[in-house]
Image: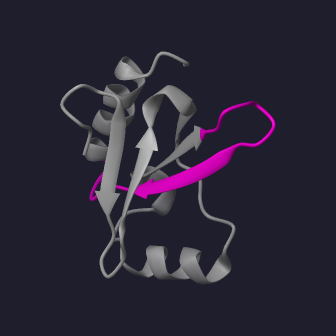
Amino acid sequence: RVDEYGFFIYWNSEGRDGQVLELSQVNDIRAGGIPKDVRLLAELSSKNRYGLDEVSLTICSGTDMVNINYTHVVCPDPDTAKVWQAGLRSITNNI
């Protein structure tokens, strides 16, 4: 979810604490992209009926262009992934 003012994106993963990402630090929002962790990749692939590249987004963020963090988001279907990518790009000033 994005907060009402468009400053933060936040989410809760099952069984984990919530996380927050400040949108002013987002450098790019890419369609597709898969995690390099083989175990995580296998788990995500087994839970999704679509190709992982079709339903995932990679949010690139950081305070500078050297130390970049990659946050992988998996959407329920390809259309939702496209909507989220377009929506986040429209409220992010750094892209």
Give the percent coordinates (x, y) of residue 40.
56, 77
Is residue 51 found left or right of 30 in the rendered image?
left
Q: Which residues are magenta?
A: 61-78
Relative to 14, residue 34 above or below: above
On screen, residue 18 above or below 65: below
Which quadrant, please, contains the C terminus?
A: top right
Give the left or right position of residue 67, taking residue 4 as reference.
right
Please indicate whether residue 80 sits to the left or right of residue 94 in the image: left
The residue shown at (25%, 46%) is 1
Q: Compare residues 77 and 93 and report the one nearer the observer.
A: 93
Query: Which of the two residues, 90 or 10, is positioned nearer the viewer here?
Result: 10
- Whether residue 68 sits left or right of residue 1 in the image: it is right
Q: Position of residue 36 (x, y in %)?
A: 69, 67
Count of numbered circles in the view: 0
Q: Residue at the right extreme?
A: 66
Residue 58 belongs to magenta span: no
Image location of residue 5, percent across then percent down: 23, 25
Q: 60 or 52: nearer the eye?
A: 60
Q: How far across and down, in percent of the image, does residue 11 sit?
A: 31, 57
Vertical comparison of 58 with 66: above or below: below
63 in the magenta segment:
yes
Rendered residue at 45%/37% (across/down): 22
Residue at the extreme left: 4
The residue depicted at 53 percent of the width and 48 percent of the height is: 32
The relative height of residue 34 versus residue 31 in the rendered view (above or below) is: below
Residue plotted at (28% across, 54% down): 77
